[in-house]
Image (cartoon, rainbow, N blue to C red):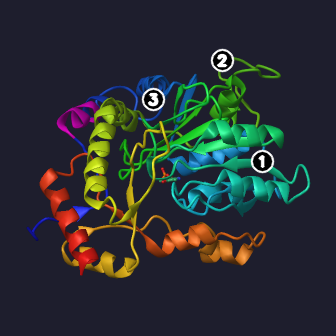
Amino acid sequence: MSDFKIPYGRQNIQQDDINAVVETLQADFLTQGPKVREFEEKFAAYVGAKYALAVNNATSGLHLSVLAMGLKEGERVITTPITFAASANCVRFAGGEVWFADIDPDTYLLSIESTRKLIESKPKGFFKGIIPVDFAGLPVNLEEFRKLANEHDLWIIEDACHAPGGYFVDSNNQKQYCGNGNYADIGVFSFHPVKHIACGEGGMLTTNSEEVYKKLSLLRTHGITKENMSENHGGWFYEMQELGFNYRLTDFQSALGITQLAKNNDGVIRRNQISDTYKKAFQGKIKFQSLPEGSYNAHHLFVIEVENRKELYDFLRSHNIFAQIHYIPVHTLPYYKEIGYGNADLSNAENYYAKCISLPMFPSLTDKEQEFVIAKVLEFIND
Ligand SMILES: *Cc1c(COP(=O)(O)O)cnc(C)c1O
C-alpha cells in the first residue's frame, strides 16, 4: 500500500477540459473574449447571483471588492484568523486596518458572538466591514451577519473560496447558496487548482448590485471605460475614470472554468461521500468540524483535531499521506504580529491551530486510498 502518494487536495482535469482549452486557443480571443462572458453567466446562474465578474485570481478579486465597498486608508475591517492570508491582506492593499474576531470552536467559522463583542467594544462607525470566510467549505450563516452588519452600517464580503455549491438554510427555510448575494454585498471565489474549480489561476466575484458590479468591472480593466464619458473625440475615445488594475482572466482559462464548473455538483457530492466515510470511522474517537442543522458543506477540506498533531502529520507523511494544516492563524504571522491592532482574545483560533490537520479530500480520492488514510489515522490514535 505504501506506493500510494496521497495529497490533501488535487485538481481533476479530464479530456473534455483539455479539448475546451485547445479549442479556445485556436479561436480569435486569447485574453478577455466570449468564453469569459459565458463563464460569468454560467457561474452567476450556478450560485444564484445576478452578476458575476471573472478575475485573474481571488486575491485580486478581494482587492477589487474592498475598493468597490469604498474602503479607504485607516478604515477598519473584521475577519477571521483561521483563513488564508489573502482574506486579510486585501484590507491592507487599500491601507485599511485588519481586526480579528475569534472563531467558533466547533464550526471553526468566524464567531458571530465574538464579532458582535468586538464591534460593540468600540464607538459607532469604528468598523466599516466584515469579511467572513466559508472555511473548509462550511457556509457562514450570513443572515445573522447581515443583521449585525445592518445594526452597525457595515458591508459584508463573503470569502467563498472554499465553498462553491455549499449552502445554509435561513430563517425562512430557504437554501442560501454561497455567493448568491442575498446577504453579502460581494462573494469571492478562487480557481486555484486545490480549490473545487481549477483554472490554473482565476477567480470570480458575485453580487446582486448593479452598481457594485459596474464598479468592479471598471476597476478590473484599469478604470478605463467607454461608458458615461464626459466628452467623446471619436470611435477610439475612452476615459480613465478611476485608478484601476489589469485583473482580467483569459479566455482559455475561462474555457477550462466552464467545463470544470459543469463537474462541480458531482464533485461536491463525492466530497460529501468522503466526508461521511471519515465521520463514520472517527465518530466518538476524533473531533471533526461540526455541521450546523440544514447546512451543506462543500468540503474543500476535511479537518480533524488531535492532541499530537505534529506527530500525526509526520507519521502520515512517512506513509506518503500528505495531510496539511489550515491555517496558521493570520494574526500570528510575523507581518500581522508586528502591526498588532487591538489585543483580542483569539484563544479558540489558537487552540484550534494547535490540534488541526486536514486529511485528503478531493473527488478523485479512491475508496481504497481513503481506507488507507483512515487506517493510518486510527493506528496513530490507538497507539
Ligand atoms: C485560496 C484562497 C484565497 C486566494 O485565492 P487565489 O485565487 O489563490 O488568489 C483567498 N481566500 C481563501 C479562503 C482561499 O482559500
Give coordinates of residue 268: x percent, y percent: 33, 39
19 in the magenta segment: yes
Question: Which amino acid is tagged 2?
Answer: Gly
Q: CA distance from mark 3 to mark 1?
A: 27 Å
At mark 1, the secondary structure is: loop
At mark 2, the secondary structure is: loop
The CB of the residue at mark 3 lies under 8 Å from ligand 1: no
In-image side of 369 versus 260 (left or right): left
Give coordinates of residue 116: x percent, y percent: 76, 52
At mark 3, the secondary structure is: helix
143 in the magenta segment: no
Give coordinates of residue 300: x percent, y percent: 39, 50
Q: Is residue 93 above or below residue 333?
A: above
How many other residues sit within 10 Å of disc 1, few (<14), some (14-19) or many (≥20)?
some
In the rendered structure, which segment of residues is drawn in magenta?
Answer: 14-21
Residue at left offset 31%, top offset 54%: 279
Q: Which residue is mark 2?
A: 235
Q: CA distance from mark 1 to mark 2?
A: 34 Å
Q: Is residue 236 above or below residue 178?
A: above
Q: Are marks 3 and 2 in contact (CB under 8 Å)?
A: no
Q: CA distance from mark 3 to mark 2?
A: 24 Å
Q: Is residue 48 above or below residue 117?
A: above
Q: Earlier in the sequence, mark 3 or mark 1?
A: 3
Which one is nearer the viewer's eye here, 146 or 256? 146
In-image side of 68 versus 263 (left or right): right
Look at the magenta stretch and give its main secondary structure: helix
Residue at left offset 41%, top offset 33%: 251
Give coordinates of residue 322: x percent, y percent: 28, 68
Quadrant for the N terminus in the image: bottom left
Question: Which amino acid is tagged 3?
Answer: Val
**Residue 36 — which label?**
3
Q: Which residue is mark 1?
A: 71
